[in-house]
Amino acid sequence: MKLYEHHELLDLDLNTGPDLVQGLIKAWDKVLVVARYKAGKSVLSQQLAHCVAGGHDFLGHPVPTSRVVLYIMGEGDLDDFQERARAMQKVLPVPADMLQWAPFPEWPLNTERGQADLLKTADQVQPGLIIYDPAYILLQGSMSDDLAVKDFVRSIGLCQERTRCTSVIMTHTHRPIRTQSGQVIAEGDTAWLGAQTWMAWPRTIFLLTLRADKARVLSCDTYRRRVAMEHPLVLTMVEPDPLMYIPWQEGVTPIMATCLALIEAASRTANELEQLTERSHSAVAGALKGLLGMGLVDRVSVSPYIYKKKGATDSQLQILDGVQENTS
């Protein structure tokens, strides 16, 4: 058992580094992300992994320092993660050795062997962020069993103390609770599946919900550290390639959102966008016309036209796929 003398505790340098994600997640934070089935939580968690490992903004919030990420995969086929990773890599590239995948742990993390395996893997990787996706697969027993949950979060706590990393657990909501008249009772981010013990572990709880218009809303009503979302984030899922969330903008269609994500990653010609999106000339042309009309992208007057991130100077253009950089 490790002891800290009182003044030694006061003088410890704990979590004084930059946020993991500025304004959203602190370094060495304990985060629970709650979403119902098929709401798109794995896309969200995988995008977080790419952004932290690659040093990219996450949902418009800066990542001050890139960090090694360990992603522990409890469900989903390996080829599903590979497909999503390939689609995200085009716009959120990750350098070598910055993102490590641990598919389908052999032992539940709330067992002695599972805990030992987790600590051994973390010692090897030395992550700044570990994502556990999802909780109900990675533990042995029921999500409603207080003892099973306590052992699970204890394993995560030991790993976090050892590596000084941020821990993010992905979990599901329970079935909706309704009034006698059939109306759903809004429980917010306390609608997680399982025991009340889950509430004692996280410092931050995010809730991902799906609106009727297919927009996703990421909200945070529970935070016990000096960081809080100013307002919920309304998101559009760009899919299938590239695959990522971007901030929702009224009037932006799915094909417009896809083109916008590609252009913000690197300046493109219309022909490149047609090839990357596998959409027709007319569909891409209509999307570009709409983006220009809304003032979301700029166009360089060369032949062929180059569409660039709004406000980017010509010297900042990143041209991919063999198109020469414009220096005029």
Image (spheres, rainbow, N blue to C red):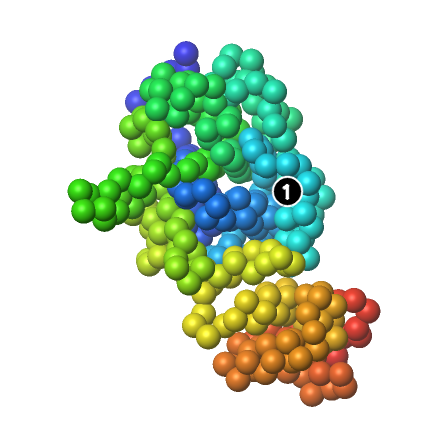
The extreme front residue here reads 181
Q: Nearer the viewer, residue 198 or 52?
A: 198
- Residue 158 point in image, percent of width and height: 46, 22
Image-based side of 190 in relation to 272, left or right: left
State the residue at coordinates (39%, 57%): 211
Can residue 244 be seen in the rendering of this structure? yes
Location of the N terminus (image quadrant): top left
State the residue at coordinates (43%, 36%): 171
Can residue 4 be seen in the rendering of this structure? no
Task: Name above or below for residue 136 compared with residue 294.
Answer: above
Q: The residue tagged with tag 1: helix, strand or loop?
A: helix
Among the 4 quarters of the image, the one containing residue 279? bottom right
Task: Name above or below for residue 218 compared with residue 133.
Answer: below
Image-based side of 256 in relation to 28, left or right: right
Task: Name above or below for residue 128 compared with residue 194.
Answer: below
How many numbered discs, if any? 1
For badge 1, the amino acid type reads: Phe
- Residue 147 point in image, percent of width and height: 36, 16
- Residue 203 point in image, percent of width and height: 35, 37
- Residue under numbered circle 1: 81
Location of the C terminus (image quadrant): bottom right
State the residue at coordinates (45%, 70%): 249
State the residue at coordinates (61%, 28%): 104
Q: Nearer the viewer, residue 14 or 201?
A: 201
User: What is the crowding at mark 1: few (fewer than 14 residues within 10 Å), some, or many (at least 20)?
Assistant: some
Image-based side of 50 in relation to 268, left or right: left
The extreme right residue here reads 322
- Residue 150 point in image, percent of width and height: 37, 20
